[in-house]
Amino acid sequence: MKLTRRCALAGLAASVALIAVSALEIQSTEAAAKGQINTIGTPGVAIKGYDPVAYFTERRPRAGKKEFSLRHKNAEWRFFSAANRAAFEADPAKYEPVYGGYCAYGVAQGYLVKIEPEAWSIRNGRLYLNYDDGVQKTWSKNPSGYITKADQRWPKLIGKP
């Protein structure tokens, strides 16, 4: 009887895992259809409307303001100030989050998924965003390894060979 119960529980656990992976694959497909810049949760607006420059200048996430926005790579980018917008305009590659603002850990796993702007890090002068604080903790255990994997998977995820 106990063996049957264990088998049933193992089967249930496998089914739940399969559903979770399927949900991530669907989310990944939907995200890929949206483009190279993460606008999940805020259609047409990059990285949930947060100011990418503030991560570098203030060492913290800051919500951008619509009045300090600009279009870049088919998305609206918002900034906390006109000065931050000007800095981004002068050198977008310096401030853009890596992997289009998708979760860096998710990209390393082969998925394009949402981020929480408060889950972030800067490594080698580049901004990396993560799904949430829990994923951020996992990411921080081996960022170099995850970056290597993500760099390999990113072109395929955005449809470039």
Image (spheres, rainbow, N blue to C red):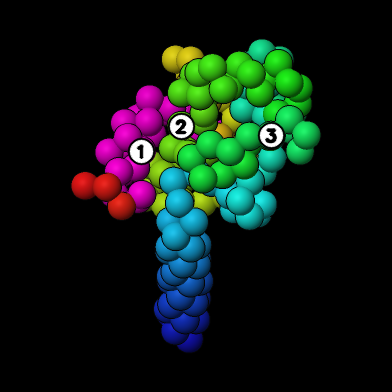
Tag shown at residue 69: 3
- Quick one: label 1, few (<14), some, or many (20+) residues within 10 Å? many
Name above or below for residue 40 compared with residue 153: below
Residue picked out by circle 1: 150
Give the number of the mark in front: 2 or 1. Answer: 2
Looking at this view, is 120 or 14 the one in front? Answer: 120
Tell me where residue 144 appears, x and y as whole percent. Answer: 38, 25
Q: Is residue 130 visible?
A: no
Q: Earlier in the sequence, mark 2 or mark 3?
A: 3
Q: Position of residue 128 (x, y in %)?
A: 51, 30
Q: Distance between the Cα atoms at labels 2 and 3?
A: 20 Å
Comparing labels 3 and 1, the label whose residue is closer to the camera: 3
Sequence-wise first label, 2 or 1: 2
Q: Are marks 2 and 3 in contact (CB under 8 Å)?
A: no
Residue type indicated by callout 1: Ala
Q: Amino acid at mark 2?
A: Val
- Magenta stretch: includes residue 154: yes
What residue is at 63 percent from the left and 34 percent from the top? 70
Q: What range is drawn magenta here?
A: 137-158
Q: Residues within 10 Å of mark 2 (few under 14, many from 20)?
A: many
Query: Image quarter for residue 62?
Result: top right
